[in-house]
Image (cartoon, rainbow, N blue to C red):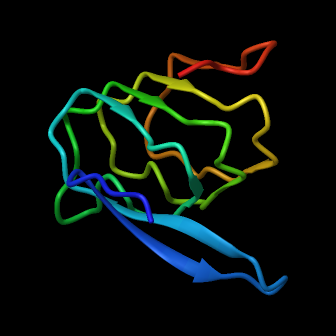
């Protein structure tokens, strides 16, 4: 289990029988958020929602372990401008309610 007080992470059993760590909520206050290595999925409304929009986060770094991002994961992140996306990210289904300046896809695997 991943232990970090800024994140709520739940282990979920997938249809394949494997366990995936799902990021359910970010509770921190940093402008740059580094998703913990070992998270496999970023769920909807992890960083903000319509009741509590987030005006602080400007950059999110997503590790290689993330293979799925839910459609509304970054909804209501009003200040988000950059996202560093994993080299191995399989699927990214983002319905953004914001304007990103850039999404950076590295040519090689990111190092911690």
* Residue 44 makes an appearance in the image: no
The one nearer the camera, 94 or 38, is 38
Q: Quadrant of residue 103?
A: top right
- Tell me the residue at 53%/22% (across/down): 112
- Tell me the residue at 58%/81% (across/down): 12
Q: Quadrant of residue 41?
A: bottom right
* Residue 61, x across and y down, in percent: 49, 29
* Residue 18, x across and y down, in percent: 75, 77
The one nearer the camera, 89 or 5, is 5
* Residue 97, x across and y down, in percent: 45, 46
Q: Is residue 21 above or below residue 104?
A: below
Relative placement, left or right, of 15 versus 36 is: right
* Residue 2, x across and y down, in percent: 42, 58
Q: Quadrant of residue 102?
A: top right
Q: Is residue 12 above or below residue 87?
A: below
* Residue 50 makes an appearance in the image: yes
For the N terminus, the image quarter is: bottom left
View extreme (top): residue = 107
The one nearer the camera, 74 or 96, is 74
Relative placement, left or right, of 63 versus 105 is: left
- Tell me the residue at 20%/36% (across/down): 55
Q: How many marks?
A: 0
- Tell me the residue at 76%/28% (across/down): 87
């Amino acid at each position: 289990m991943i232990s970090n007080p800024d994140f709520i992470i739940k282990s979920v059993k997938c249809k394949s029988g494997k366990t995936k760590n799902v990021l359910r909520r970010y509770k921190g206050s940093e402008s740059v958020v580094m998703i913990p290595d070992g998270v496999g999925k970023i769920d909807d409304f992890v960083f903000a929602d319509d009741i509590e929009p987030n005006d602080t986060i400007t950059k999110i770094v997503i590790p290689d372990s993330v293979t799925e991002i839910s459609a509304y994961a970054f909804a209501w992140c009003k200040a988000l401008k950059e996202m560093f996306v994993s080299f191995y990210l399989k699927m990214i289904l983002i319905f953004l309610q914001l304007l990103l300046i850039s999404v950076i896809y590295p040519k090689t695997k990111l190092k911690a």
